[in-house]
Amino acid sequence: MNYLTIDVEEWFHILDDPAVPVISVWSKLEARLPRNIERILSILDENKVKATMFWLGWAAEKYPALVRRCADAGHEIASHGYAHLLAYEAGREKFREDIQRGKKILEDITGKEVSGFRAAGFGTTADTPWLFDEIRAAGFVYDSSVFPAKRGHGGIVDFKREPHVIYTPDGSLLEIPQSVVEICGRRVSFFGGVYLRIAPVFLIKWGISKLHKEGRPAVIYIHPREVDPEHPRLSLKLHRRFKSYVNLSSTVPKLKWLCENYKFGLMKDFLGTVKREG
Ligand SMILES: [Zn+2]
């Protein structure tokens, strides 16, 4: 099985750069999320693909009807926190408040329990050992916050690559890490964000078949801004600019290709299979 995930946030929700606007000005910036979500929904709908959508609480609060529209179309509504905080910068208390707030907003909008969480920027590191306890304590039953490779922000290089259960004081939490493949002992991704945008299709195809041979699902992640190459640009530092803006026009054709060629399930349903096995 494969999982197509969308981190639902605006074009300015980039991390780790002084040019990123602070939350107090977000509502004054140009809004592009609704049309970008509509574009993604139409591609998914044409191909009868269901995605797992990690909604930022701030965006959900602004567009509750759009959250409901995604839920009514059969996509899973999961949480991406409220204010796009990097866990290791926010610290435990602030992170706890943020994820509880994000979850409640989504549950109030949809009237349904939200099972899954993904931290902003896959901001899980060896310095946030409390992270899984807090995610489970907030009531989430699965998490997809870990990028098990070296990365600009976040990333745990020696983390298990396959989905597995993590035990916390509040119960078990299923961890579904971002997909990476090993090439010559190095872990690399072709499966989301900048990695998906710069990798040629043959490499993505090879990577997915390698994951399947190893018995692992392919976890793909896309941001709404990536289907919108004309979105405004922030004055980011050179390396952030490259990662955020290179090859944006390749996302739509790659998303279509993925939808036409692979089957995708919802992450919350993966949870059911693990429970049955356990
Ligand atoms: Zn994000």
Image (spheres, rainbow, N blue to C red):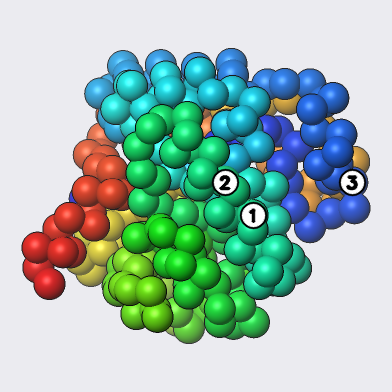
Which comes sooner in the sequence, label 3 or label 1? 3
Instruction: Name the residue at the left extreme.
Output: 276
In the rendered view, does 67 fall on the left or right side of 71? right
Q: Residue at x 53, y 33 (%)?
A: 251
Q: Which amino acid type corresponds to the residue marked 3 in the rendered image?
A: Ala
Q: Which amino acid type corresponds to the residue marked 1 in the rendered image?
A: Asp
Quadrant of the frame with the C terminus: bottom left
Where is mark 1, residue-wise? 98
Q: Which amino acid type corresponds to the residue marked 2 in the rendered image?
A: Gly
Q: Which mark is residue 19?
A: 3
Q: How many C-alpha atoms fall within 10 Å of the one at disc 1: few (<14), some, or many (≥20)?
A: many
Observer-nearest of 208 and 40: 40
Query: How far apart are the alpha carbons under marks 1 and 2?
Result: 6 Å
CB contact under 8 Å: marks 3 and 1 = no
Q: How many C-alpha atoms fall within 10 Å of the one at disc 2: few (<14), some, or many (≥20)?
A: many
Query: How far apart are the alpha carbons under marks 3 and 2?
Result: 24 Å
CB contact under 8 Å: marks 1 and 2 = yes
As helix, strand or loop, the secondary structure at mark 1 comes to helix
In front of the other: label 3 or label 2? 2
Where is mark 2, residue-wise? 102
